[in-house]
Amino acid sequence: MPRVFVLFFAAVLSTSAVVGAHHAVTPFYDLTKTVEFDGVVTRWIFKNPHSFLYLEVVDEKGQKVEWEIELGAPIILTKQGWTPDTVKAGDRIHAKGSPSRAPGTHGLSSMAGGTLTRQDGSRLVAESGDTPFGRGGRGQQP
Amino acid sequence: MRGTLATLTAALAGAAALLYLSVHAGAQTRPASTSVPELTGVWSNQTEGRCTPNGRNCPFKVEELPLNARAVAYWQFFDEPIEPKYDCVPATSPGIIQDPYMTEIQQLPDRVVLRYEKDDVTRVAWLQGREPQKKEYSWQGLSVARYEDNALIVETTHFLFDPGGLDDQGGLASSHKKRVIERYWREGNVLHARVTTEDPLFLTAPVTFETVWQLAPKSAKLATFECDPEQASRPLKFMPKKYPDGPAKIPDVTVGPPLYRGLGETK
């Protein structure tokens, strides 16, 4: 009787830490670190397999830096109430999450416990993975 | 007691014989036989208890997997950019099955069609005893199906080498010898799947996972994925390069396959 390993795939995932459905998170983002900042939305790209939110952020030296924030797949975000108009250029967002690993890059994962908060305090992405639309979640990022 | 046991044994043997005949005689059709489950419909991934890709319901670790030395060596060499997914090449089974997207099953007399929201993948599992031909290798492989004990069994072989084909997430490859056996059965409005993967080139034993879906409302339809290659590859720049760009010098010819050692040397 061959040895059978139940739930094999998640086994791999548990080692590669938190993953999205399209790719693993840990090769790209350092989950041991957290950064947070306020920024103004410049672009919101709502295309599969990942949506990306771009924020213009003024760093500690007064320089403008563009951060790229990775979100889940629109095909699943749509089921949670997201649309191409959920975020608009000019919106002010507070972002918190794991930074990208490659030196000189300004990437942030909203997956793996990241948060995105509007100026009025409402959450676009909460740590649990739930959205202000009240669905999805359970820590499962699309 | 002994008589009851004998009757039960005879009944089971008869049922097994009928099942064998129904499977091997070809012309498998639905839905006359009670051994054919009603699986046609759209199935939602939004189900508690699903084996989610974040590992929440999946406590095992990669160190516990039955990888052979080749698989471990490949895993160490693996570099994320070689995954064709970053150019929108679709995931294969078994990875495609456990992703958190909706799935549609359509049962026809001669085939079962399995559609996935992710990557717009459509798989066809052939009934009626069709066997793969030697040359029928393809990215998704060739699937044949049968009904057995009120379950749908799908067996897929004839895959191509897939750089991440064992898991779709962790850098474990699968070979052309990969064989995936999916067993689907229904309990009320819950679809269960038990998926076993064999690959003698990378695994020393089969690996299995289970997952579930919830029957979606009749109005539910699969959305189109329309993967955008620019978006798909965008995260790659966030990863430090494992291997430098540009030509690489082979430091020692003895590290290559034996056939190539000394190639080009003059005597």
Image (cartoon, coloured by chain):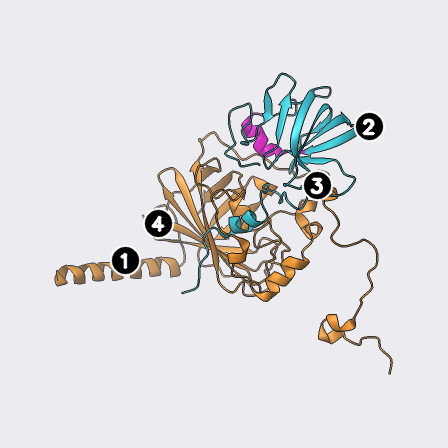
Chain colours: A cyan, B orange
Depth check, front residue: A100 or B103: A100
Q: Gap between marks 4 and 1, in whole Å?
A: 13 Å
Label 3: state its secondary structure: helix
Q: Which residue matches tag 2?
A: A61
Depth check, front residue: B1 or A59: A59
Q: Is B130 on the left or on the right of B121, as rendered? A: left
Q: Is B198 on the left or on the right of B119, as rendered? A: left
- The magenta stretch spans residue A73: yes
Q: Gap between marks 1 and 3, in whole Å?
A: 54 Å
Farthest front residue in view? A60
Q: Amino acid at mark 1?
A: Ala
Chain on which label 2 sits: A
Callout 2 and callout 4 share a chain? no
Residue B252 at x, y percent in the picture? 79, 70
Instruction: Decide which of tag 1 and tag 3 comes sooner along the chain.
Output: 1
Pointers 2 and 1 in contact (C-beta within 8 Å): no
Magenta region: A70-81
Pointers 4 and 1 in contact (C-beta within 8 Å): no
The residue depicted at 35 percent of the width and 57 percent of the height is B22
Q: Which dot marks residue B47?
A: none
Q: Gap between marks 2 and 4, in whole Å?
A: 67 Å
Instruction: Decide which of tag 4 and tag 1 comes sooner along the chain.
Output: 1
